[in-house]
Amino acid sequence: MMTADTKLVVLIGDPVAHSVSPAMHNAAFRERQLPYTYEALRVTTDHLAAAVSSLRGANLRGANITIPHKTAVMSLLDAVDAAAQRIGAVNTIVNQNGKLTGYNTDAPGFLAALRKSGFEPEGRQAVVLGAGGAARAVVFALKDAGAEVAVINRTFSTARALAAETGTRAFETSAEGYRQALEGAVLVVNATSVGLSPEEAATPLPQEWLRPDLTVFDTVYRPRRTCLMREAEAAGCAVIGGLEMLAAQGALSFELWTGQPAPLAVMLQAAEAALV
């Protein structure tokens, strides 16, 4: 129940109806007995500036930012953390007395989930599918961890721009592009929204390119097992789901808003329950 002392945190994106972040964060707030509540707000591009401006209110503690606003939101903030500035995407905002600061917890959250699965990226070749805000976080995280990275994106010019910026390689979504990008790769990361419910039959990577020596990480978490994950498992690949990354990045956001350690196990359990 909200009171005059309750601090509000919101999720800003379009769409947001699929999100389990409210269930995940509200469970964390209850676990830590904090007077916080978390709500999802569908915000179109036309209304982004107004939505961000409203975060300066005294009872607003901050926000998560999701598709498609992670890059556009940066120009609306008072400050952006150095790591988020470098990545070029913000997924977490903290309101401190009316000053809005942007952070990126996607990159460390992705790495935490990847390493938790037992995969160490240093010195290994990875392919990232996508070149948007989430993909940027993944690419920078992998590069900083010492991996060699190739980017595949439907809009090749966007992939090429990201590759030039990060010292990676860019390839088109063609048979030759897949062949070249995947040669020598041991990790594939889907950082697009392809496969997100209700488009559950869609996959960002043709099945014929899956090999048993690949680890496949799908950042999409709804459904829990995406088409890409099912096909990867059938091909003998090791598979990592997006819920682990969601919980890991969410825990880092929680700590930025509250200054307290996040109850990660509680957050993951609540996120899983919300998918049922």
Image (spheres, helix red, strand yellow):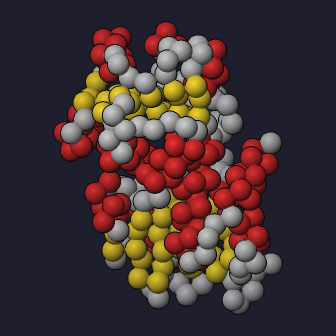
Which of the two residues, 263 or 136, is positioned nearer the viewer here? 263
Answer with left or right where residue 115 lies relative to residue 180: right
Residue 264 position, x and y percent, is: 66, 59
Residue 49 position, x and y percent, is: 41, 68
Residue at (55, 87) in percent of width and height: 58
Is residue 117 shown to the viewer in this render?
yes
Residue at (62, 53) in percent of width and height: 247
Answer with left or right where residue 8 lies relative to residue 63: right
Q: Quadrant of the C terminus?
A: top right
Residue at (76, 54) in percent of width and height: 270
Residue at (73, 74) in percent of width and height: 32
The number of callouts visible is 0
Residue 139 position, x and y percent, is: 35, 42
Is residue 43 shown to the viewer in this render?
no
Residue 183 position, x and y percent, is: 34, 16
Answer with left or right where residue 182 lies relative to residue 188: left
Answer with left or right where residue 73 lies relative to residue 238: left
The answer to which image quadrant residue 198 occupies is top right
Which of the two residues, 111 or 29, is positioned nearer the viewer here? 111
Q: Quadrant of the N terminus?
A: bottom right
The relative height of residue 108 versus residue 200 in the rendered view (above or below) is below
The relative height of residue 261 versus residue 275 in the rendered view (above or below) is below
